């Protein structure tokens, strides 16, 4: 897959050895509340229908859907099996995957019965994943291949930490949205804590190159037991961040690069522009 315009350039330091991890879990169950909200963005009829349904991963982008680009990039990185976490009403996903007929990787569906949070979404994939390590990514984000390849080399749990200045420079995400993303605190490459929704004082103290979490993790099967131990957060959801706190240790991999985000209607035009000419190989 060729590199999208205005996305991170190739990193010659990226590992070339065979990946340790070949399974990915893609969280595609979200309610899409922000995407459903009416906005001033000019959309095609197909895009408007996808936005109204909240199925961000199925958003038409050029001649493809967003999930096509994600699966193609994961296959480029070394993934050979992808588990999409979806809602019980997943007929559109089923039809689309049948039309795609991917041969570079196996694509499975795992049903999350209720939208009970990211940790519950991961737990829903347990049977499909089995007892193997995997990477977890958001279905409405497109991650840089060099960063994902680094995660695939990890023998244990790890988190890709994006430098905030690089996200501002190379992503399509506005500064105010990035300012609300969780900050990663680490020492000697080990995760100390994840600070969700940092206030202005915390952001200033962290500095422009503070590491930001974009929900790009490598997990061992231990995460499933961690997901089972946690309680709902104050907003009533089972959060992957709380499950991460249950793990004994997690490495942090700093990365200077951008992420394409498709969480709102106004994101669609810019994501489509940056993906123009990008080849999808499935």
Image: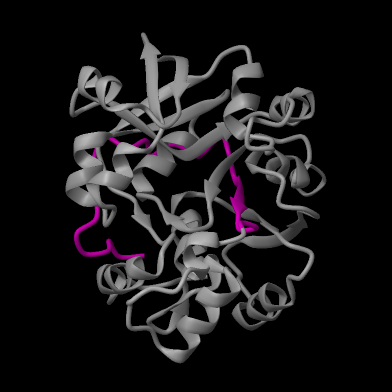
Q: Is residue 164 visible?
A: yes
Placement of 199 over or under 99, stated as above or below: above
Q: Is residue 115 above or below residue 281?
A: above
Q: Residue furthest bottom?
A: 45
Across and down, in percent, residue 248 comes to 62, 12
Q: Is residue 85 shown above or below 221?
A: below
Magenta stretch: includes residue 271: no
Q: Residue at x 49, y 87 (%)?
A: 46
Q: Residue at x 78, y 42 (%)?
A: 126
Give the image location of residue 128, x and y in percent.
78, 49
**Quadrant location of the N terminus?**
bottom left
**Residue name at image x 45 percent, y 50 percent:** 77
The picture quadrant where one finds residue 176 is top left
Q: Position of residue 233 (x, y in %)?
A: 65, 30
User: What main secondary structure does the magenta stretch of the protein show?
Assistant: loop
Region in magenta: 1-30
Q: Quadrant of residue 164?
A: top left
Q: Where is residue 189? Give x, y as percent.
A: 39, 14
Count the labels in the image.
Answer: 0
Asked which colour scheme the image uses, the reply is one colour
């Amino acid at each position: 897959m060729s590199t999208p315009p205005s996305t991170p350039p190739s990193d010659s330091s990226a590992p070339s050895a065979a990946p340790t991890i070949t399974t990915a879990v893609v969280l595609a169950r979200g309610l899409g509340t922000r995407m459903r909200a009416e906005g001033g963005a000019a959309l095609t009829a197909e895009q408007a229908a996808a936005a109204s349904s909240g199925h961000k991963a199925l958003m038409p982008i050029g001649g493809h859907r967003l999930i096509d680009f994600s699966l193609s990039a994961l296959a480029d990185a070394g993934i050979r099996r992808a588990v999409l976490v979806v809602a019980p009403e997943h007929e559109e996903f089923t039809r689309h995957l049948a039309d795609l007929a991917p041969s570079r990787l196996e694509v499975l569906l795992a049903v999350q019965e209720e939208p009970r949070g990211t940790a519950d979404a991961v737990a829903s994939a347990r049977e499909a994943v089995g007892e193997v390590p995997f990477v977890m990514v958001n279905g409405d984000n497109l991650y840089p291949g060099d960063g994902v390849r680094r995660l695939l080399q990890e023998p244990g749990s790890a988190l890709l930490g994006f430098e905030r200045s690089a996200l501002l420079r190379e992503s399509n995400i506005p500064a105010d949205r990035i300012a609300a993303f969780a900050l990663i605190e680490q020492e000697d490459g080990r995760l100390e804590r994840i600070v969700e929704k940092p206030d202005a004082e915390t952001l200033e103290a962290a500095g422009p190159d503070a590491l930001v979490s974009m929900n790009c993790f490598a997990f061992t099967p231990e995460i499933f037991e961690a997901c089972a131990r946690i309680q709902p957060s104050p907003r009533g959801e089972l959060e992957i961040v709380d499950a991460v706190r249950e793990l004994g240790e997690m490495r942090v991999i700093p990365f200077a690069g951008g992420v394409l985000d498709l969480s709102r209607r106004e994101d669609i035009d810019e994501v489509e522009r940056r993906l123009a000419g990008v080849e999808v190989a499935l």
